[in-house]
Amino acid sequence: MKHLKHLSYLSVSLFFCLNSFGQKTITDTLQPESLSEIVILQSTKPVAFKPLATLDSYLEQFQNVSLVKRGAYAWEPLINSMPTERTSLTIDGMHIFNACTDKMDPITSYVEINNLSMVRLTSGQQGSQHGPTIGGGMDLVSKKGSFSEEAQNNADIQSGYDSNNRQFILGGAFHHSAPRWYFDGSALYRNADNYRAGGNEEVLYSSYKKLNLASNLGYALNPHQRIEAAVIYDKATDVGYPALPMDVSLAEALITSIKLESHFEDGFINHWETKLYYNTITHRMDDTKRPAVPIHMDMPGWSTTYGLYSKLNGSLDKHQWTAQLNAYQNTSLAEMTMYPNNPDELSMFMYTWPDVHTFYTGLFIKDLYQIDARQSLNISGSLGNQTSEIKNNTALESMQIFYPNMESRKNRFLGNIAINYENEWKKWKFGGGLAYGLRAPSVSEAYGFYLFNSSDRYDYIGNPDLKNEKSLEANAYISYENNGWKSKLNGSFFHLSDYIIGKPVDDFIAMTIGADGVKRYIALDHAQIFTAQWMLSYQFTDHWNWTGNINYHYGQDSDKNNLPLISPLSYSSSLQYKKERFNTALALQGNALKSNFAPTYGEERTAAYAIVNINAGYLWQFGKQSLNLKTGIENILDTNYTTFADWNHIPRLGRNIFINLSLAL
């Protein structure tokens, strides 16, 4: 914490010093827009979208993103078929770490769709701007206010209903702008019952309630500097997880930040910003609503993060560069208490995450060099240091049962480098790149203590002696655009050395009742992952457009075993019509048979499926007010299906009729 304070003082000092170099008036382009389309960078946009969809179901539509579903809420995003241990997930550039040992609270669950401006999605090690990653980065950017020459007020009210799970949605947003300050606030509430799979099959323990509040306040210190404060509060209760043996009584997050920002007109530096942030998450698992539980358990978890980043953007001749300093300290603590049914027996207690304090500092640098009008070269790299320490002696002694010589503190050096080349020739664009990077084991992989995986039915034990995982990446793309046609083919290949994964250990006895054994995280010699995506679209007329996507994924370890959670061949196709205030779309999506399943890692084959969706929308204008209606039917044929990413093969949503309304005032 001492180091973090020093970095904070340094960043604030840097801000005031740089202002003497030259400044320009801030031009604010983030005008508020009610339920506007969310921009996804470096990915193909989905074509069929209901405005009040959950963020999970929206992200699922993108080519190199898939989501692991353990219930109807809080799905775990995978980028390039890699789980969250191998990717970087941030909100407005802030590092936030989940508090659940079972991944029931990815940070995407703490942002709502009505407060999201864009998703910055980057593939592979190019996503390391906010911290080390090998799979890619996803930064959820919330909506921000803007200044105006005269005082203005805008507001909207949003409501929605889903027939399948009787989900009721109510929200609203307010924006005030003035020459020197602005304020934005939003709220969204969801209340959903159990959903029904195809054939009217009720999926028990899939209901949830959720409230999300967000606000930001900006103040212009002068015509070329501003300060901004932001808060997100998210609370979910009574969340069911049908694929797991436990549910969640509470998932609560408080995310706060303050940012200083300045622009410069002349000189080497164009823009500077520094953000200080704090967030805390509380997550409580329990099984009190499950029938015939052999032994009642409480499993609370906490995650607290202090951090900062300081970013400079600049240009010189043909160079556009970025330099960013990142620093954060995270505390992860999780417990488990087991209460025997016999009141005369003593309860049992253990730390599943042993109060791990992780401190990271790193520097990221990127240079985009415009070789000529057609060619560019993008070089980026980062270098950082990570220190992890167990602060609780009781928890440390528990880990020392398996690792007698284990020390409480571990230091690791991390870094990566990526080089990408792009070229434009007539109606063609193509490019490719190479990258190399490292990532440290996650808290669960290094320090997890009897973490039960309900999919393969093993207890998992961490391994603090694991080496850094290494990734050598190659990527390429080619695109063409002409006479209404657009096509893009891109792919990435990852060779992962010291690949971290769980393997059975015969010498240990399982803790969880019904578990098949114990797995310990080890490092395989290597693993390989390949992903490819092809997008094709055609604009028939000014009103009609068609888009299709095909995705292919492949993954094997060094023993030629298939890796888990690798998507089979998937596809989507949609036909859209838009004229004046009316729009409609018909969409098809599906997966082929998952023949590349991983029985070695407890995975089973999943059948092929295809579903059809349709939606339509209309906008009414009443002077300065407007009413936006969006309605549609998901899974029209009421197909009963499951995907490769559905934990324990829980079936997905059956036929659902939705209606979303937004009234702009």
Image: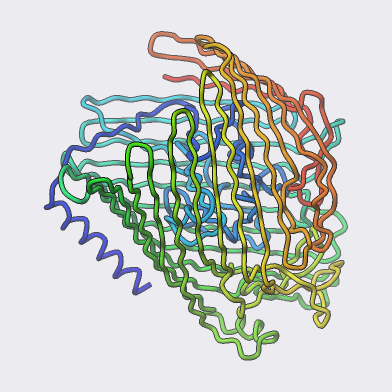
Q: Residue at x 64, y 41 (%)?
A: 209
State the image coordinates of residue 629 (x, y, percent, origin top left).
57, 17
The residue lying at 62 percent from left, 74 percent from top is 447
Q: Quadrant of residue 299?
A: bottom right
Q: Is residue 349 above or below residue 568?
A: below
Using the image as rendered, state which of residue 570 and residue 457 is in the foreground.
570
What count of labels does the image hold? 0
Q: How is the image coloured?
A: rainbow
Please provide percent x and percent y for residue 416. Answer: 46, 63
- Residue located at (36% from left, 54% from top): 366
Quadrant location of the C terminus? top left
Q: Nearer the viewer, residue 175 or 92?
A: 92
Q: In the displayed structure, does residue 75 sit left or right of residue 637? A: left
Residue 266 is drawn in which quadrant?
A: top left
- Where 618 falls versus 249 (above or below)? above
Q: Which residue is painted at 17% across and 42% down in the image?
A: 265
Farthest residue in the front direction?
425
**Left or right, 12 with reference to 127:** left
Q: Whole-percent x and y of residue 563?
A: 74, 59
In the depicted view, which residue is nearer to us: 60 or 154?
A: 60
Q: Determine the residue located farthest toward the bottom in the rendered image.
A: 405
In the rendered structure, the answer to whether residue 565 lies left or right of residue 494 reads right
Residue 491, placed above or below residue 379: above
Q: Quadrant of the N terminus?
A: bottom left
**Image location (x, y in percent) of residue 205:** 77, 46
